[in-house]
Image (cartoon, rainbow, N blue to C red):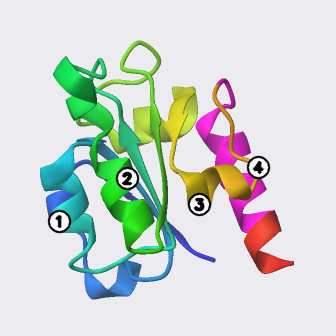
Amino acid sequence: MKRFLIDSVSAITAEMAGQVVVTGSHGGTSAARLALTQPPALAVFNDAGIGLDGAGIAGLAILNQHGIAAFAVSHQSARIGDAASTETSGQVTAANAIATATGVVAGQTTLAAIEQFVQTTSA
């Protein structure tokens, strides 16, 4: 499975559909809707501090409803808007049920969570 890094989920392309997409975007509802235009197998976001009523991760549930695994990393572990930072220093804070079913858990690094997802879904 290929991995793509995009600072903004608005840059998602057809080539990324069905692949792992690591973004620097918040994990809110608008970001989820953008991801749905080219549905990845796994989408990674920044939790943006979680926010009021969980707004920074609300998109994870939307993606779950559409069969897409997704998780968010702490805004304190990775720079918002920087996919490379999300990938290299991100720490998982929230995951939807599909990602959790593959073994993704809070506290993992982004790289460990992606590896867990890929191993589980490739088996």
Depth check, mark 1 against mark 3: the one in front is 3
Q: Is residue 91 left or right of residue 6?
A: right
Q: Label 1 to label 4, Cα distance in Å?
A: 25 Å
Q: Secondary structure at mark 1?
A: helix
For the residues labelled 1 and 4, say whether their Cβ atoms are less than 8 Å apart. Answer: no
* Residue nearest the viewer, comparing 5 with 104: 104
Amino acid type, label 2: Ala
Q: Which residues are magenta?
A: 107-119
Q: Label 3 to label 2, Cα distance in Å?
A: 10 Å
Residue 7, percent across and down? 26, 48
For the residues labelled 2 and 4, say whether their Cβ atoms are less than 8 Å apart. Answer: no
Tag 3 residue: 98
Total tally of numbered discs in the picture: 4
Q: Residues within 10 Å of mark 3 (few under 14, many from 20)?
A: many
Dot 3 or dot 4, earlier in sequence: 3
Tag 4 residue: 103
Q: Is residue 16 left or right of residue 117?
A: left
Magenta includes 113? yes
Depth check, mark 1 against mark 4: the one in front is 4
Dot 3 or dot 2, earlier in sequence: 2
- Residue at point 22% right, 20% down? 51
Tag 1 residue: 34
Residue 61: give its label: 2
Farthest-out residue, top: 76
Q: Secondary structure at mark 2?
A: helix
Amino acid type, label 4: Gly
Above or below, 9 against 18 in this view is: above
Residue 103, percent across and down? 76, 49
- Residue at point 51% right, 49% down? 96
Amino acid type, label 1: Leu
Q: Quadrant of the N terminus?
A: bottom right
Amino acid type, label 3: Ile
